Structure formats: C-alpha cells, structure tokens
Amino acid sequence: MYDLVGKRVWVAGHKGMVGGAIARRLAAEDCEVLTVERTELDLTDQRAVLGWMHNQRPQAVFLAAARVGGIHANNTQPVDFLRDNLLIETAIFTGAESVGVEKLLFLGSSCIYPKHAEQPIREEALLTGPLEPTNEWYAIAKIAGIKLAQAYRQQFGCDYISAMPTNLYGPGDNYDPLGSHVLPALIRKVHEAKAAGSPVTVWGSGSPLREFLYVDDCADACIHLMKTYSDGLHVNVGSGEEISILDLTRLVMEVLGHDGEIVMDPTKPDGTPRKLMDNSRLKAMGWTPRVSLREGIARAYAAFLNGDGRNI
C-alpha cells in the first residue's frame, strides 16, 4: 500500500481531460496537489522540468501530460506526436529519479496494442504484432513510456507503474472536428446536426467496435493503482464493454434528443476493427467502473453545453 495522505503529488498535464479528472479525484485524498501551467513550464524542456522538480520536490507523480488527438491529427502530424511525447516522458522520468520521487504512475493508451490483437486484449499482447498505422506515432511514444517505467524499476529500483486506459471521454474533452476522438466528435456532430436539423455524418463503415470509459472512473482507477499496485507490467483500465460506432452514434443521438438521419462516409478510415481491453487484472485488484455509457454521455454533454472542454 502507498499512502497519499500528506504527500506532495504532482499531476503533470492537469489541464488535460485525464489530468483534470485526477486532480479532482485527489481532492478526497488529503494530499497537496502540485500543478504548473503550460505557460510557466515547457514539459518538453528537460532542463526546465528538472529545475522545477528540484524546487517543488514532489513525492508522487501522475504523468498524464501528452500530445493527443484523433486519426486525422495523428495522420497529419506524426513528428509532433512522436517527438513531443518522447520529450515529455524523458524529461519527467529523468526529473523523478533525480529528486527521489517515491512513486510515479505513467498513463498510456490502448492504442499501444497490435491492430489485430486477440480480443479482449490482455496486457501481454504488447509488441506481439504491427500497430494500427493511423496512430502508430502516438502508440510508439506511449510504448516508450511504458518501457522507461520498466527500465527505471529494473536499473534503479524506482517504484514506477503504468496504466493503459481505453477510450476516455467526459469533462475537459477535445471537441475539435478534425483533432478529437470519436465520442466527443459525435457529441459535437449530433449537437450541431440537431440545431441545424441536418443528418449526422459518420466516418467509415460504422462497424468498428470500441470500448469507452468515463474519465472520472479512469481517475479513480489511477488513484487505486497508485495506492495498491507495484509491478513492472502495465495495467489495462477499461469498462469491459464494447459498442459499434454506428450504435454509439444512435446512442448519442438518443441522449441528445436528435432523431435525424445518419449518413456514412466510406471515404474516411475506420481504424482498428475491434479494440476491447481485458480488464480482469484491475478487477481482481478490487476496482470496477461506476458510470454507465449512457449516463457518461449525458454528463459529457452537460459539460459540453457549459463550455467545459477544448475547441467547443
């Protein structure tokens, strides 16, 4: 058990959706939450990060900072996704070891797994096959982060762990039509289609299966892992349930109250055909999600209407 009470805990990436949810969740842990604005500290600058960490002396770190985006962003900005994420990871891991951070949790992504991994995807599937080409730059950077955590554990005995969340959504999400992930993109599309009385256009065939987890559930899982888990193997964080993109579109339309037409755009890519995480390891540790997909979409839409997100 790792006790967070009274500890100085840095949430790197607190302005992002996941980091923000972790910071909210830590309010119940009786610890001192450290954050720093992007304008004050460039997380890709190793020297600056090292200096800040030496001044602040965090005892625990949640590494949620990353450059993220959907299929279009990954396809058109491969250098940004690979370079920036590698630099962020290197800077924070180096600083953590230098200042003697007691525990660090690195947040990865389910896109680290092979495109045609056996379903549900177990943690051991990592590096057993080719990645999905539309997001391989981001995936390779996240795999490097997992390996950094394992390397520091092996070489220096650092208590660094990694969590691999499935597709996340909720308050603070990115709603950019070209840079967002599928669920926030659908929320915005359906919202605008409802206002205009127009059809909802869905990328690809609508057949790919995806799993979704409300971001506050993910934050709760991360706190649980920080307290109870200490091993080199990364841990999947998911809901254990999947839905097709077409059925997801119908559900979003139902929750938002739009009964218009759905139009498929076959010129756009589908991405990985199926991606369901095996979350049995995390369940065996005593954690399960609380927020259903329908309830989560309703909460996410309420946050969207309140302007709680990016590129709204």
Image (cartoon, rainbow, N blue to C red):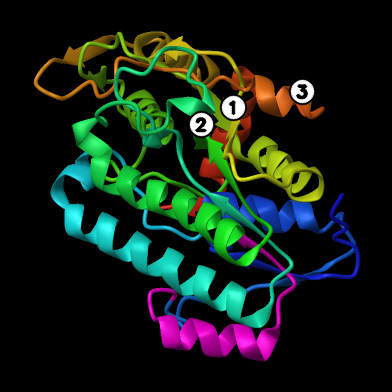
Q: Residues within 10 Å of mark 2 (few under 14, many from 20)?
A: many
Residue 293 position, x and y percent, is 59, 20
- Dot label at residue 284: 3
Residue found at the very far front of the displayed protein: 155
Queried whether the magenta region covers residue 34, the answer comes back as no
Q: Which residue is mark 2?
A: 166
N-term-proximal mark, 1 vs 2: 2
Q: Position of residue 15 (x, y in %)?
A: 54, 62
Q: Is residue 308 visible?
A: no
Q: Is residue 207 left or right of residue 241?
A: left
Side of 265 relative to 18 (left or right): left
At 62% from the left and 28% from the top, the residue drawn is: 296
For badge 2, the amino acid type reads: Thr
- The residue beneath circle 1 is 238
Element under disc 1: loop
Of circles 1 and 3, the one toward us is 3
Could you tell me which residue is drawn at 30 percent across and 8 percent down?
Answer: 207
**Range of magenta residues:** 43-63
In the rendered image, the vertical position of residue 255 relative to residue 3, given as above or below: above
Q: Amino acid at mark 3?
A: Ala
Asked whether, in this view, residue 58 is left or right of residue 106, the answer is right
Q: Is disc 3 placed on a helix, strand or loop?
A: helix
What amino acid is labelled 1 in the image? Gly
